[in-house]
Each structure stands twice: as structure tokens, then as C-alpha cells.
Amino acid sequence: MALSNAERQRRHYEKQKEARKRPGDITAALQTKPFFEFYGEHPDQDGFELPLQLANVSVPEFNDDSPATFPPDLEGAEVPETANSIERAELIVASLIDAAAGLATIINDYKRKEITDRIAEIEAGDLTRPEARKQALADVVQLKRMLQQLDKQVRWTFPQWKVLK
């Protein structure tokens, strides 16, 4: 059965998304200096290292041009192959983005649950007095605004780090 235009587009974008996650790109043939040497001389290392330290995450080292090594608990899992330090760095970027999105989802779910629990508590409370009912209504409105804000997606911009065909 022939694919519809929408299905072809969807598959095309899925392939592009997967290609962006894989380390390496078409600039590999142009690279003469290994990334780890460039990284060691770069004046803005703190822009990468400091946020990781603040998050209590160990900073990866770029001391040589070796590929990524993975902890033993990932043995048997499908992990991307990296050939050198630039591909290892690209894998780190993709992994940090995925980790941030995963943690943001968990935080969002937590806050939603806490807000909806507060709304349920307010609705189950004693609303017989007009002042209490008025305050409860104001509180519920504010809590629902918080939920609306949590419905939104945010977009952070980064410099492009992958070059695809």
C-alpha cells in the first residue's frame, strides 16, 4: 500500500530526528585537529562545566580522542557507537537534552499533582461562609492558572552542533 504524503513526511522527520541523536556528521572529513585539543584550549569551558557542577553531575573529561565508554549496567543495552572525542561530545549533548526533558516531565507531573491535590482539598473544605467561599474561589482560580502555565511547552535555543545533509 502506498504511503500518504503525511506518512512520508512523518517518516522523513523521524529519520532526521534519529540522525540528530546519533554522533558524527558530515563535517568529520573536514576536521584536522582532534576535538579534545580544541576543548582544552577553549576559554568558555566554564559554560559547560559550571552548570554540571551546580547540578552535582560529574564533568566528563576530554583528555584524549578515545570513544565513549559506558558503565557496566548498560551492558546489553543498545548504545550509540562513538569513534572519537567530538562524537563523544555530541553524544553528551544529545543525552543531556534527553535527560533535561525527562526530568522536566517528572517535575511537571509532580507540580500538577500537588496543585490538583490542593484544588481537591479546597473543594472538599467548608465553604458555607461567604468569606471562605470567596477566598476558596480566588485560590482555585490562581491554582488553575498555575496548571495552565504548566500546560505550556518551553523552547531553549542552542547553537547548532550537528550538520546534516
Image: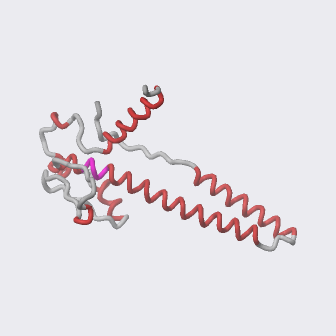
Determine whether 131 is above or below 23 in the image. Answer: below
Query: Which segment did they paint magenta?
Result: 89-93
Q: Residue at coordinates 27% horizontally, 47% vertically from top-left?
A: 90
| Relative horizontal placement of residue 102, taking residue 39 as reference (left or right) | right
Determine whether 161 is above or below 62 in the image. Answer: above
The color scheme shown is: secondary structure
Residue extending farthest to the bottom is 126
The prevailing secondary structure element of the residues shown in magenta is: helix
Which quadrant of the rendered structure holds the C terminus?
top left
Q: Residue at coordinates 38% horizontally, 32% vertically from top-left?
A: 12
Residue 67 x/y as whole percent: 16, 52
Which quadrant of the rendered structure holds the N terminus?
top left
| Relative horizontal placement of residue 119, taking residue 129 as reference (left or right) | left
Q: Residue at coordinates 59% horizontally, 51% vertically from top-left?
A: 151
Determine whether 10 is above or below 63 in the image. Answer: above
Q: How many marks?
A: 0
The reply to whether the magenta stretch includes residue 143 is no
Q: Residue at coordinates 13% horizontally, 54% vertically from top-left?
A: 64
Residue 104 x/y as whole percent: 47, 57
Between residue 33 and residue 79, name the one nearer to us: 79
| Relative horizontal placement of residue 141, taking residue 53 as reference (left or right) | right
Residue 126 x/y as whole percent: 81, 74
Residue 27 x/y as whole percent: 21, 35
